[in-house]
């Protein structure tokens, strides 16, 4: 569990209760940030020369967010055409902030800012601290609007108008650094002085500075302590002493030359089959150049197969990065499968021990909420009305009680996970739902229902996305230039592209490259009845679910409920018995709420097929050649911990994004961001261990180990 910062205030300046040190200079914290981090990393000059897709900064110690906001301000000033803050610079602007042409007229770059904070400040403390600088108000407000709940782990915060992504990690830096997959251009070594915070300035920090920093990447830090000098030298940096800010005599900068001798390949430390970076990036220093040769720039084209929620979010994530995307689907409309249901539920079912699986879904749920708010107006197509997950049987009662105890919640009605989830009594649940509820439950105040097809339609309006319908892809082949060519059942051949992502649910196994995947189709049917009234205020979840009434294509006001599960079935036939079962479950799970629908009216229904994996975890990431994989890693059959020195046989440019089951609203958008990051080499939006958990190659490994 994360521990929030304990703040003391001295003359309006925040002081850490944990380290008894100031968060920034009492003289002028803003000028110090500009001087130490922006000026001495030469950001203005480097950004004016930037001619590739993204630039990455990593910071040790987010604190009040002051360094991030200064960086954002400079980024906007140097990229005015795409800035969300079209304001001129005042006369008091730091000298490093020069006017410039847009960073890249045809395709503006994207800034990724990675930061860690072990003791997060509260929203109010950050707001109070930043109020010292009114000139930062246009940046402070959108940061505060999206400032995450104080829940440990990764938080992805996007500012699309400025083309900035903040990757904010709440937790210990020694846990954070090994989980990062990125190539860092500039480091802000901030945080409190080594004498007060020795745990941060450890060997772990310098080991990963070496691993993560591009050749010619830079470091700046306010300190010139001996431990920092020795650590940077050992990590392959050249050091330069500089005059410090204000009363500080010295500070230090460094440039990474990777001059400590040959680097051991990363697959000696991690399983080589989980990350394409092991074979494509980490052993290839030519790819680490700060400004690569434009003549060698990669053609940014991609083919997405399947236009459900995973395919449409995948297309959007790549289009936002400047890729020209062709989105192909076998049906005559997008979201024709499970993504076409009229009301899908957005929440996260969390285990009592908050295992890796639950951490992933919680992260995905929070990301989907942010993306929805940015891309789809609240109203007829989605409503964050809240979700009540009721303790409907003994097993669920026990799980929810364990969940409450894990977060030391002393009463039955209390906040857990900092407002993301609340434990509620039957009385509180009744008040929230608007109908009588007899069970206690977990309440997600920001959750709700979504019409997935409307969301998909909003996402694919991006000008970089071209949609092709009524074409079923039956064959994928690579040409001699490592480009992918697709053929459809009608005989149409699609133009060669550098990247291909298969998002076609259980049909993905019809392609030869993915025939080994043990996916299973699970047909299901939702039912709809006209609403008698609008008494129900939240989504109810038990063994089934019921959504509040909403407009629909076939019924003026309808409530959606269900859904049935037909294991190992790929039939989308509408079955009378499923409607009967759905109605029986509705009346059994939510007897009072069932009275808000007209059960004597004609029932409408929709059946579709979900795609699930054996471990009920999505299948997401870069694909390998099955035959070569089995040959290279055959020793796993003898020893599952065998250490390999040969990289995995990744099929360059081929990825898969499927297996989301009934939770695609919470998982698919974040998974799409992961693949987009893997494709363009930007920082991954989640921990490596979670990306490993999703990898399609886990099934190849398991097959070899089991000898099947």
Image (cartoon, rainbow, N blue to C red):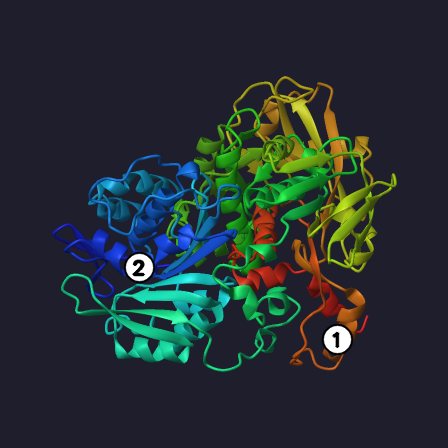
**Quarter of the figure with the N terminus:** bottom left
- The structure residue drawn at horizontal position 36% and vertical position 40%, both measured from the top left corner, is 142
The quarter holding residue 587 reads: top right
Residue 476 image point, x, y percent: 80, 52
Q: How crowded is mark 1: few (under 14 residues within 10 Å), some or many (20 or more)?
A: some
- The structure residue drawn at horizontal position 61% and vertical position 62%, both measured from the top left corner, is 693
Horizontal placement of 510 versus 144: left or right? right
Give the numbered dot on residue 37: 2
Q: Give the answer, above or below, for where 212 lies relative to 583.
A: below
Between disc 1 and disc 2, whose residue precedes? 2
Front of the two marks 1 and 2: 2
Q: Give the answer, above or below, for where 207 lies relative to 682.
A: below
Asked if residue 168 shows in the view, the reply is no
Q: Which one is nearer the viewer's eye here, 440 or 690?
A: 690
- The structure residue drawn at horizontal position 45% and vertical position 41%, both measured from the top left corner, is 425
The quarter holding residue 34 reads: bottom left
What whole-number distance in Å separates the C-alpha atoms at marks 1 and 2?
Answer: 45 Å
Q: What element carries label 1?
A: helix
Q: Which one is nearer the viewer's eye here, 276 or 202?
A: 276
**Quarter of the figure with the C terminus:** bottom right
Residue 200 image point, x, y percent: 34, 70
Asked if residue 487 shows in the view, the reply is yes
Q: Do the residues labelled 1 and 2 touch (CB within 8 Å)?
A: no
Residue 331 image point, x, y percent: 78, 34
- The structure residue drawn at horizontal position 52% and vertical position 65%, both measured from the top left corner, is 288
Q: Is mark 2 on a helix, strand or loop?
A: helix
Horizontal placement of 218 versus 104: left or right? left
Q: Which one is nearer the viewer's eye here, 185 or 692?
A: 185
Give the numbered dot on residue 646: none
Which residue in the protein does label 1 denote? Answer: 632
Q: How crowded is mark 2: few (under 14 residues within 10 Å), some or many (20 or more)?
A: many
Q: Give the answer, above or below, for where 464 lies relative to 417.
A: above
């Amino acid at each position: 569990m994360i521990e929030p910062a304990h703040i003391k205030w001295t003359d309006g300046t925040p002081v850490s209760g944990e380290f008894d040190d100031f968060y920034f200079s009492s003289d002028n914290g803003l000028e110090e940030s500009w001087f130490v981090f922006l000026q001495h990393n030469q950001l203005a000059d480097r950004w004016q020369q930037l001619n590739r897709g993204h630039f990455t900064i990593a910071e040790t110690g987010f604190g009040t967010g002051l360094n991030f906001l200064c960086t954002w301000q400079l980024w906007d000033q140097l990229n005015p055409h795409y800035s969300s803050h079209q304001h001129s610079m005042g006369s008091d602007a730091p000298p490093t902030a020069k006017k410039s042409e847009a960073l890249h007229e045809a395709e503006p770059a994207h800034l990724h800012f990675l930061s860690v904070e072990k003791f997060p400040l509260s929203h109010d403390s950050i707001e109070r601290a930043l109020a010292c600088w009114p000139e930062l108000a246009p940046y402070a407000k959108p940061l505060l609007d999206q400032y995450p709940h104080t829940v440990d782990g990764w938080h992805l915060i996007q500012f699309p108008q400025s083309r900035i992504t903040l990757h904010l990690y709440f937790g210990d830096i020694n846990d954070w650094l090994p989980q990062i997959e990125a190539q860092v251009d500039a480091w802000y070594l901030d945080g409190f002085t080594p004498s007060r915070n020795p745990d941060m300035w450890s060997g772990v920090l310098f080991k990963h500075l070496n691993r993560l920093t591009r050749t010619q990447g830079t470091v700046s830090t306010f300190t010139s302590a001996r431990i920092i000098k020795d650590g940077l030298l050992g990590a392959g940096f050249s050091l330069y002493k500089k005059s410090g800010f204000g009363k500080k005599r010295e500070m230090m900068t460094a440039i990474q030359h990777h001059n400590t001798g040959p680097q051991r390949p990363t697959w000696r430390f991690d399983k080589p089959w989980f990350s394409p970076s092991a074979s494509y990036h980490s052993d290839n220093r030519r790819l680490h150049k700060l400004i690569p040769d434009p003549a060698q720039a990669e053609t940014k084209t991609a083919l997405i197969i399947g236009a459900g929620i995973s395919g449409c979010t995948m297309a959007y994530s790549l289009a936002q990065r400047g890729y020209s995307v062709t989105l192909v689907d076998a049906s005559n409309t997008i979201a024709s499968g499970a993504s076409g249901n009229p009301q899908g539920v957005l929440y996260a079912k969390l285990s009592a021990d908050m295992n890796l699986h639950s951490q992933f879904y919680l992260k995905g749920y929070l990301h989907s909420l942010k993306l929805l708010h940015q891309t789809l107006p609240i109203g007829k197509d989605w409503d964050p009305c809240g979700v009540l997950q009721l303790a409907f049987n003994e097993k669920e009662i026990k799980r929810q009680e364990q969940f409450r105890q894990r977060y030391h919640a002393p009463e039955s009605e209390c906040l857990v996970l900092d407002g993301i989830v609340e434990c509620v009594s039957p009385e509180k649940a009744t008040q929230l739902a608007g109908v009588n509820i007899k069970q206690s439950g977990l309440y997600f105040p920001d959750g709700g229902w979504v019409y997935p097809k409307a969301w998909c339609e909003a996402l694919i309006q991006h000008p970089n996305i071209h949609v092709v319908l009524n074409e079923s892809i039956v064959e994928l082949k690579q040409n001699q230039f490592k480009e992918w060519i697709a053929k459809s059942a009608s005989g149409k051949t699609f133009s060669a592209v550098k990247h291909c992502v298969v998002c076609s649910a259980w049909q993905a196994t019809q392609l030869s490259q993915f025939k080994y995947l043990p996916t299973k189709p699970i047909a299901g049917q939702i039912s709809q009845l006209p609403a008698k009234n609008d008494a129900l205020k939240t989504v109810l979840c038990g063994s089934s679910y019921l959504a509040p009434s909403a407009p629909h294509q076939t019924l003026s006001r309808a409530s959606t409920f269900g859904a049935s599960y037909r294991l190992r079935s790929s039939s989308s036939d509408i079955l009378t018995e499923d409607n009967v079962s759905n109605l029986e479950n509705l009346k059994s799970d939510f007897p009072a709420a069932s009275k808000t629908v007209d059960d004597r009216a004609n029932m409408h229904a929709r059946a579709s097929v979900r795609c699930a994996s054996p471990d009920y975890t999505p299948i997401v990431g870069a694909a390998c050649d099955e035959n070569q994989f089995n040959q290279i890693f055959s020793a796993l059959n003898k020893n599952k911990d065998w250490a390999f020195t040969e990289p995995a046989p990744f099929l360059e440019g081929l990825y898969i994004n499927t297996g989301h089951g009934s939770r695609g609203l919470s998982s698919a958008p974040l998974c799409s961001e992961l693949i987009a990051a893997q494709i363009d080499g930007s920082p991954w939006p989640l921990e490596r261990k979670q990306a490993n958990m999703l990898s399609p190659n886990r099934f190849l490994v398991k097959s070899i180990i089991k000898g099947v």
